[in-house]
Each structure stands twice: as structure tokens, then as C-alpha cells.
Amino acid sequence: MESMVEENGSAVDPLSAGSQSGDAAPAIATSVQSLNRTQQQTHHLVASTSIVQLTLPTSGATQVQSVIQPNQQSVIQTATNIQPVAISKGNVILVSKPNSVIQTAQASLQTLQVVETGSDDSFSDSEESPEQRGGILTRRPSYKKILNDLGGGEITVIPAGTIQIATQGEGVPGLHTLTMSNAATAGGAIVHTLIVNNKTKNLGNTVSDNVPAYTGHGVVVEDAARKRELRLLKNRQAARECRRKKKEYIKCLENRVAILENRNQTLIEELKSLKQLCEPKTD
DNA sequence: ACAAATTGTCGTCATAGTCT
DNA sequence: AGACTATGACGACAATTTGT
């Protein structure tokens, strides 16, 4: 299956439009500064976005409204219920909900997010002011929570180009397997995800795989040093995961900016033309 | 070419939040 | 309630950029 993208008459490959992912700074508060630095090397994030029309031959006259950011990940926003959408370069993305956001970076799929929205406005503002949170400075909601608030489905992206998908609500619990043919690692990657009671468990290597536990008469014996090692190891991994989620969250926000700016521009132009129509003729 | 400044990444700690 | 997890904050270090 091949997709055709038209932008002012010229073909554009939305997947190749993405490139360097903007590496984020340690804190959200400073992320904009950091992104600015990254974008010195790329281009300005939103300034050069453009609308393209994706024509998908096999799905009839279906069109996808997309926002293409040069040197940034692409945003593909579906205008209608079109599923599945297949895109060149070997990535097949099944979109189960309207108004989805699909992020790609370079040739390999890096982030895939399904956002269930009635309209763009349903990007709920998950960042509350301290006042809104009760007037005291408290910890912000977790990225997981924020992203869940943004959309119905939960999709976790694993660094090595693998994708882990969990279904909530109407989803059928069970073992889900997702294979990526062009994962960053050679030969692709397969992730098995076990969903039990709406909770996701990675069936890959776990922390305990790496740290041997000594058992005696069925009782796990661990000295303080071992416990500490285990704790540090877990926390190290947790920190990595947390940073990855933070980057994902920031990308999500960037996409949101791109979509909203694009929409804003459209509305401005619409307003202009309506004004012109309403203007009394002077000659 | 070199030093200083800037930025990114990582490991660790502390602790709020969540789970059992 | 205690164990566990997620995340902000911090410092160390490396890589990159900038000014001279």
C-alpha cells in the first residue's frame, strides 16, 4: 500500500519529514529553553508547519489532515474515521480512533499516540496552577496520568523502537503482541504485553532477572547491601523510564502546539475571507 | 586551538503518590 | 501501614557551541 501526500502539488513523505527528536531538558520548566537549543540545529518548531492532504488509495477518497514539521516529528491528524492507515517505509499504523496523533522520527516509528477527542479542544489542560491544586505546591500529576487524561488508549513506547499497547475500557484483556518490522535494533523487536485486570506487565527482562536472590528454606534472604543494590538498580531504571515519558509528554505538547497553531491560522484565514465577503462593494 | 559557557544525560536521593 | 513506584532536584560528567 502506498500513500500519496500532496503539498502544493509536490509529493511529501510524512515519515521522512521527521528527524531529530528534540531532546528535552531535565525539567518541564526548562524544556522550552532546551528545545530552543535543539531547534537551532533544526528549524523553528511551529513556524514552518504546513497542511498536507494524504490521499489513501485503498481507503477510497479518505483524506487525512496532517501537520508536517520539517526536521521535527510529523503530526498526522485524521479528519474522519479512516482506519486502517498504512504509510510507506514499512510502517503500518492502525488508528482506531478519530483525531489521532501519530509521531514519527526519521524512518523508524518512535512514538505513537492515540488521542480520543471530539475536537481539538478536548486536549484537556492537565497543567493546573498551584492555586488550582489547592494553593500549595504539590507534585504534578504523573506523565502517565496526564497522557491518559489526554486520550482513551494507553500506548507505551519502548526505547529500542518497540511499541507496547494496552487497551482500556472496551479492550479485551489478554496477551497483546506488536511487532515492528523496522525497529532500530536489527531484525525488529517483539514485545509481549500481558494485560491483567487492566494492568500492563512487561514480559521481557525484569529487574529481578538481573539480581540473584538467595533462598533458604523458602525464605528470601537479602542483606542490607543487596537490598540497597536492588533498590538503586530499580530506581535507576525508573529514572530512565521517567525521563523517557517526560520526553514523550513534551513531544505530545509540541504536537498540540503545532495542531493548534495550524488550526488558528486556518481560522484566521477563514475570518479574512468571510470579512471580504461581508464588505460592501465600494465601486 | 583553547577556554568558557551551554546543554544533555545519568545516577542518586528524597519524598509524594499508589498499591496491596 | 508498609512496600513499592514515579518524579523533582541535584551534582557529576561528557559533548557541543561560542567567543577570543
Image (cartoon, coloured by chain):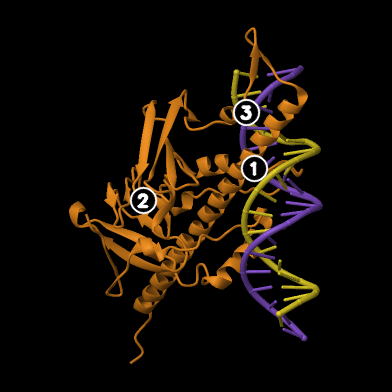
Chain colours: A orange, B yellow, C purple
- Image coordinates of residue A133 in percent, x first then y, are 69, 42
| Mark 1 or mark 2, whichever is nearer to me | 2
Q: Which residue is mark 3?
A: A211
Give above or below for A58 relative to A266: above
Q: Report the Cα–Cα distance between label 3 and label 2.
A: 32 Å
Point 46% across, 72% down: residue: A48
Between A186 and A279, which is closer to the camera in this rendering? A186
Between A66 and A246, which is closer to the camera in this rendering? A246
Q: Report the Cα–Cα distance between label 1 and label 2.
A: 27 Å
Q: Report the Cα–Cα distance between label 3 and label 1.
A: 18 Å
**Host chain of mark 2:** A
**Host chain of mark 1:** A
Q: Which residue is mark 2?
A: A182
Give above or below for A25 relative to A204: below
- Image coordinates of residue A5 in percent, x first then y, are 28, 65
Looking at the rendered structure, whether the residues under marks 1 and 2 are on a common chain is answered as yes
- Image coordinates of residue C2 in percent, x first then y, are 74, 19
Mark 3 / mark 2, whichever is N-terminal: 2
Q: Which residue is mark 1?
A: A239
**Host chain of mark 3:** A
Instruction: List the single residue furthest toward the top.
Output: A217
- Secondary structure beneath dot 1 equals helix
- Secondary structure beneath dot 3 equals loop
